[in-house]
Image: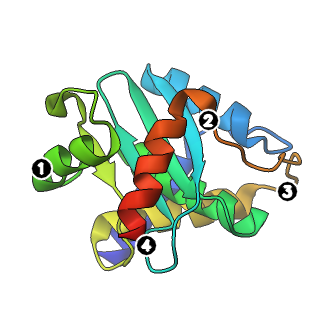
Amino acid sequence: MRDEVRRRCVALVDDLELPEPFDMDAFCEALGRRRGRALRRIPADLPTGSPSGMWVATADADYVFFQRRTTPLHRRHIVLHELGHLICNHEAPPEMTDAASQVLLPDLDPSMVRRMLGRTYYSAVEEQQAELVASLIHERITAWEPEPPPTVDPAVADVVARLERVFRG
């Protein structure tokens, strides 16, 4: 099973066009075009013990939330892990969808929120695949474009604030 998972992940990463030097914005734009939908990275101040990243998909866009208060290397890995879920075409468990849409995107019809992955343990095969895809991408990158400090787009500031409140309890 392990070898099969690795072979699948290697094949998926082999199929990607990784910019050189690696530019996360360019990679996300290309991945969004490939998927035929917008892909937005959104920094958030997530408390200790909460997920460090989360992928939420609506009918027309993918949102990758990631911990803002960590090192640049860790932020990159969090984002690549969440993108790994997209690259692997993972689906979220149905029971998460309504709750996620009500908490994170209350202005959208819950049926529009199709996927959400924000787990903290890597026991599920999907988590192992996403982690492996992130690691394989990291291995292939020889140079990184510098990234500015993450800032929240005012258009999604209310969603980020709700997310931060939910995880603070």
Q: Is residue 108 above or below residue 16?
A: above
Q: Is residue 51 left or right of residue 106?
A: right
Q: Secondary structure at mark 1?
A: helix
Q: With 126 as the anchor, is 164 left or right in this view?
A: right
**Cα gap from disc 2 to disc 3, whole angstroms:** 18 Å
Res 168 visible: yes
What amino acid type should be assigned to the residue bearing mark 3? Thr
Q: What residue is disc 2 on?
A: 28
CA–CA distance in space, label 1 to label 4: 21 Å
Q: Which residue is mark 1?
A: 94
Quadrant housing the N terminus: bottom left
- Pick the front one: 87 or 55: 55
Tell me if mark 2 has few (under 14), some (14-19) or many (20+) residues whose alpha carbon lies within 10 angstroms of its own. Answer: some
Which amino acid, by three-letter code, is at mark 4?
Answer: Ser
Foreground label between 4 and 2: 4
The numbered mark, 3 or 1, whose residue comes first in the sequence reads 1
Q: CA distance from mark 3 to mark 4?
A: 31 Å
